[in-house]
Amino acid sequence: MNRLIFMGPPGAGKGTQAEIFKNRFSIPQISTGEILREAVKNSTSMGLEAKKFMDAGDLVPDVVVIGIIKDRLAQKDCGNGFILDGFPRTVEQADALSKILKETKMDLDAVINLAVPDDELVQRLLSRAEKEGRADDNEETIKNRLQTYNSKTLPLIDFYRKAGILREINGVGSMEEITNEIQRALG
Ligand code: AMP
């Protein structure tokens, strides 16, 4: 069974690696960032609410993203496992996830944490800005996203280390090297 979380700061490559393992394990990749960007694109009420937080590089309120995950995990295709990509990002979200999984008698199998130094992240995000033109990949917002990660999301590493399911991965290297390291960590 593969019930996985891919964690790491913005620009660590969690989306890229999550996509590789989604195909390898034939399980859905659930990216709250992607779901939110889609909502913004379609101007849904959730998208309109989320946009201001995303554009500033702030986190969208817990209640919104927890709602997204609760609905998504209830769908049939999550029965054989899933990869959460970019969720949870706060202790409140991690607690909510534990509760949702407990209610459905599911357990997490592993949390992959991709570690990359801040200066490398800034370089990667700026180059992604040029290639993909994401609204939140500009220097000011990038700084805020990294700060938000350090203050709100980093504590989760300890949360999952204590739970005994954290797998720490060096996120610097070629895409293939990192994929191999994750595969080894998952056994
Ligand atoms: P990402 O694509 O994962 O980098 O997410 C892009 C943006 O969406 C973030 O900077 C947040 O504004 C928002 N977002 C995505 N996932 C979450 C989450 N789990 N909690 C709060 N905000 C989120």
Image (cartoon, rainbow, N blue to C red):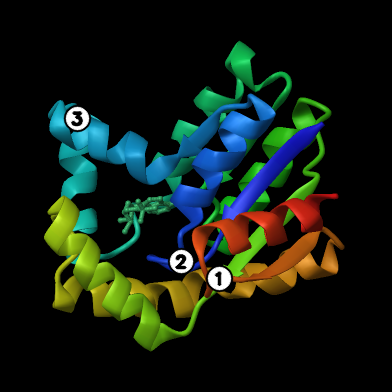
Image quarter where the N terminus lies is top right
Question: Mark 3 or mark 2, which has the lower sequence index?
Answer: 2
Residue at 42% in and 42% down: 32
In this view, the residue in front, 99 or 22, is 22
Q: Is residue 27 above or below residue 142?
A: above
Question: Mark 2 or mark 1, which has the lower sequence index?
Answer: 2
Real-space Cα separation, disc 3 to disc 2, in angstroms: 30 Å
**Pointer 2 and pointer 1: residues touching (CB < 8 Å)?**
yes
Q: Is residue 156 above or below residue 112?
A: below
In this view, the residue in front, 182 or 54, is 182
Circle 2 sits in a helix, a strand or a loop, which is it? loop
The percent coordinates of residue 142 (x first, y second) are 25, 73
Real-space Cα separation, disc 3 to disc 1, in angstroms: 36 Å
Q: Quadrant of residue 46?
A: top left
- Amino acid under label 2? Ala
Q: Is residue 98 above or below residue 80?
A: below
The percent coordinates of residue 97 (x first, y second) are 65, 43
Look at the image and tell me whether residue 8 can be seen.
yes
Residue position marked by numbered label 3 in the rendering: 45
Residue position marked by numbered label 1 in the rendering: 171
Residue at 12% in and 29% down: 43
Dot 2: within a 10 Å radius of its alpha carbon, few (fewer than 14), some, or many (20 or more) residues? many
Ligand 1 under 8 Å from disc 3 Cβ: no
Given this view, does label 3 or label 2 mark the residue nearer the observer? Answer: 2
Dot 3: within a 10 Å radius of its alpha carbon, few (fewer than 14), some, or many (20 or more) residues? few
Residue position marked by numbered label 2 in the rendering: 12
Dot 1: within a 10 Å radius of its alpha carbon, few (fewer than 14), some, or many (20 or more) residues? many
- Amino acid under label 1? Gly
Left-right relation of 93 to 52:
right
